[in-house]
Image (cartoon, rainbow, N blue to C red):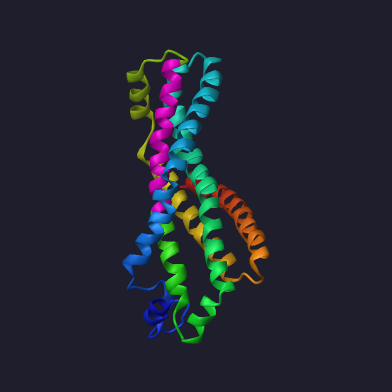
Amino acid sequence: MAILLAGCASARVSGWEAFLPPYRLGPLMTQVNAMGIRSLQLTLVAGLFAGMVVALQGAHELARFGATLYIGPAVARSIAREAGPLMVALLVGGKVAAGITAELGAMRVTEQVEALRAIGGNYLKLLVTSRLLAAVLVFPILTVIADVVGVIGGLLVAVLQFSLDSRLYWNTIAELVTVQDYLGGIAKAAVFGFLVALIGCYRGLTFTGGAAELGHATTGAVVGIGIAVLAANYLMTQLIFLL
């Protein structure tokens, strides 16, 4: 705690200044590890089964029109545009937001945040900026991983259950799925990551009460993430189609 206070003693509290350089690499990498590496297993499992479910549903619908050979593009576009970013934002985002709220809420309970304010430390830069930057960096990366694993999951269903040739699966994806499909999903993931960190930080820094109320605050953060992500997804989808 003494090191924490000493590092912020010379900083001035300013909302805008919190988002201006220089940025400290140490806190940023700590948050990248907490949000990204520790969420990798969840991303892999969720991405695999999401791809398998999309392939299963898509194959049955496409079979009605004799177009089973297009399972690959159906899976890849669905995962890249919607399922990948949404799945990461809702599953990983809920976990991350709850963790941020609990961590910052505990700092409020132990009066660490008030101590930073008392000495004029830029607590926003120390506690919020690193989390926001880490989320904006990590969520697109996790989304790309989920996309890749989801497409592989779709391949397993297409080959093992519907006897589709694996080369045909990949060739149709390469032919019909564009870079814009993936870029749209990655852009969504960056916005979702920002919302996750922002809501988590807000709930944590505005928390009042004791340890018993902290559980309600973390639950509220998860619910807020779900609503914000779904609303943002609709707005961004509309924007992408307009462009």
In the rendered image, residue 188, in percent from the top left (x then y), is placed at 47, 49
Q: Is 29 placed above or below 125 here?
A: above
Q: In the figure, residue 156 lies in which quadrant?
A: top left
Q: Is residue 156 magenta?
A: yes
In the rendered image, residue 237, in percent from the top left (x then y), is placed at 52, 46
Task: Give 218 or 49, whichever is nearer the viewer.
Answer: 218
Q: Quadrant of the N terminus?
A: bottom left
Residue in the image at 53% along x and 51% along y: 95
148 lies left or right of 113: left
69 lies left or right of 224: left
Residue in the image at 50% along x and 60% along y: 197
Q: Is residue 132 magenta?
A: no
Residue 2 seen by the camera: yes
Which secondary structure dominates the residues rendered in magenta? helix
- Residue stretch rendered in magenta on the structure: 138-160
Q: Is 75 placed above or below 180 here?
A: above
Residue in the image at 41% along x and 15% along y: 164
230 lies left or right of 5: right
Residue 195 seen by the camera: no
Q: Is 158 placed above or below 238 here?
A: above
Residue in the image at 38% along x and 29% along y: 176
Task: Give 46 or 141, whichever is nearer the viewer.
Answer: 46
